[in-house]
């Protein structure tokens, strides 16, 4: 599959989470995803962008559209230089949270995507890549 | 900071979220609504989310919180207008909003929270007129 132009958005404040959602929506439409797939990837993006802000202390979202065959879709990478996640397995468990949330952000985002990859190093940061395609 | 307008209609409060909102605005709505419930003595709160393209776990939790707080303040909450794709995504996300009453549209939502609207004034069902009778 061939990737098209990347777009990198900063995530530094609450408004940036909204901007990421809107940019992902535009890309998902352009990639030809159906309404339910669009909604899923935008929702997953919202969860991960908020995590980047709240837990990663800010970072970036990279948005990439791929329009090759047979798969067309959107791939997103959220990266931060925050404290990292000490126990990934636990962090991916429904209901586990170190903040005040519901603990559905990571685990829920994983369910909403076709591809989910997470790399985290304590003291260095976290990088999460997700993709949704049709 | 912006605020989401809260309208009063009879004994209900109406909120229509028409654009994608950031988290602080959602929190502000939660606080504003609880104050308005007490100030107006409203018995129902209707939140129209037909304008929302997504509901993530933060927004879902906010809707849940509003419903729980309203209940403590003696008001019923109903969320109306959820898009089908949003419902599918919410369930997959793991949030089925079990604490929140929902209705497909504003009319049905009003029927849910407005059913007690005339009770105190009229005592019984004398004014129910064209409404569906509910003798159950």
Image (spheres, coloured by chain):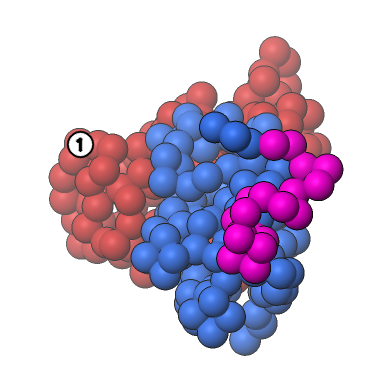
Chain colours: A red, B blue
Residue found farthest to the top:
A70
Q: Position of residue A37 (x, y in %)?
A: 65, 29
Residue sitting at x 51%, y 57%: B76
Q: Can residue B82 be found in the magenta stretch?
A: no
Residue sitting at x 33%, y 57%: A101
* Majority SS type along the magenta span: loop
The residue closer to the viewer here, A67 or A104, is A104
Q: What stretch is highlighted in magenta?
A: B115-133
In the picture, which quadrant includes the N terminus of chain B?
bottom right
Q: Report crowding for label 1: few under 14, some 14 to 19, many 20 or more residues within 10 A (C-alpha).
A: few
Q: Position of residue A121 (x, y in %)?
A: 23, 51
Residue sitting at x 67%, y 50%: B125
Q: Look at the picture and state if B32 lies above or below A124.
A: below
Based on the displayed image, in which of its 4 quarters is residue A124 positioned? bottom left
Q: What element carries label 1?
A: helix
| Left or right of B81 on screen, residue A42 | left
In the picture, which quadrant includes the C terminus of chain B?
top right
Q: Is residue A37 visible?
A: yes
Q: Position of residue B56 (x, y in %)?
A: 52, 49
The residue closer to the viewer here, A36 or B84, is B84
Q: How many labels does the image show?
A: 1
Q: Where is residue B13 in the image (x, y as percent from the top left)?
A: 64, 68
| Left or right of A133 on screen, residue A125 | left
Based on the displayed image, in which of its 4 quarters is residue B2 positioned? bottom right
Residue occupied by mark 1: A89
Residue sitting at x 62%, y 54%: B124
């Amino acid at each position: 599959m061939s990737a098209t132009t990347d777009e990198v958005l900063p995530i530094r404040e609450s408004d940036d989470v909204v901007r990421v959602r809107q940019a992902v929506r535009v890309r998902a439409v352009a990639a030809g995803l159906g309404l339910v797939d669009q909604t899923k990837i935008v929702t997953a993006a919202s969860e991960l962008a908020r995590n980047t802000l709240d837990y990663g202390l800010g970072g970036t979202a990279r948005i990439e559209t791929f329009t090759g065959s047979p798969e067309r879709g959107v791939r997103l990478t959220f990266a931060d230089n925050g404290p990292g996640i000490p126990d990934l397995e636990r962090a991916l468990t429904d209901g586990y949270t170190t903040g005040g949330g519901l603990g559905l952000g990571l685990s829920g985002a994983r369910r909403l995507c076709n591809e989910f990859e997470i790399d985290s190093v304590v003291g260095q940061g976290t990088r999460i890549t997700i993709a949704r395609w049709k | 900071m912006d605020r989401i307008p809260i309208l009063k209609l009879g004994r209900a409060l109406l909120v229509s979220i028409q654009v994608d909102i950031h988290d602080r605005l959602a929190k502000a709505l939660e606080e504003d609504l609880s104050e308005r419930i007490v100030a107006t003595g409203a018995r129902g709160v209707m939140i129209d989310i037909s304008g929302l393209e997504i509901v993530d776990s933060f927004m879902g939790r906010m809707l849940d919180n509003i419903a729980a707080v309203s209940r403590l303040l003696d008001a019923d909450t109903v969320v109306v207008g959820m898009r089908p794709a949003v419902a599918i995504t919410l369930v997959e996300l793991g949030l089925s909003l079990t604490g929140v009453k929902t209705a497909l549209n504003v009319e049905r939502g009003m029927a849910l929270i407005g059913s007690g609207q005339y009770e105190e004034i009229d005592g019984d069902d004398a004014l129910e007129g064209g409404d569906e009778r509910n003798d159950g």
